[in-house]
Amino acid sequence: MSGDANLNTEVSVLNKINAAGVLTLRTLQDSNKLLASLLEQQTILAKQQREATANTINADIRRRASLAGNMAQVTGTLTDSLQNFRMQ
């Protein structure tokens, strides 16, 4: 409140209260925008991490699948070599 009677009228006080309410709402709106931005960043990071993990798992699946075929080929070749081995 002010010592000036004109600044303390009911309308003036209500205007000040309304102005404070508007400032509060704007502050809350800015806070919500910031929180939404942080959430978006976390969502992007989580998606990138999930994709990296999925790529690692898929690479391991491919490696294991080709390993079985490669081992069968090596084993078959080794068996043939041992069966056809002659000592000189």
Image: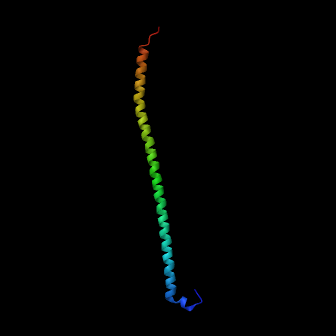
In the rendered image, residue 35, in percent from the top left (x then y), is placed at 49, 63
In this picture the colour scheme is rainbow
Residue at image location 41% in from the left, 32% down from the top? 66
Give left or right: position of 79 versus 6: left
Residue drawn at the location 40% of the way across and 17% of the way down: 80
Quick one: 21 or 7, which is closer to the camera? 7
Image coordinates of residue 26 in percent, x first then y, are 48, 72
Q: In the depicted view, which residue is nearer to us: 4 or 75?
A: 4
**Image quarter of residue 43:** bottom left
Name the image quarter holding the N terminus.
bottom right
Vertically, is 32 above or below 52?
below
Spot the residue most to the bottom.
5
Q: Who's the residue at 43% across and 44% down the image?
A: 54
Tell me which residue sits at (52%, 90%) in the image: 9
The reply, left or right, for residue 76 in relation to residue 31 is left
Height in image: 18 above or below 79?
A: below
User: x%, y% of residue 12?
Assistant: 51, 87
Q: Residue furthest right?
A: 3
Vertical relation: 80 (above or below) 17: above
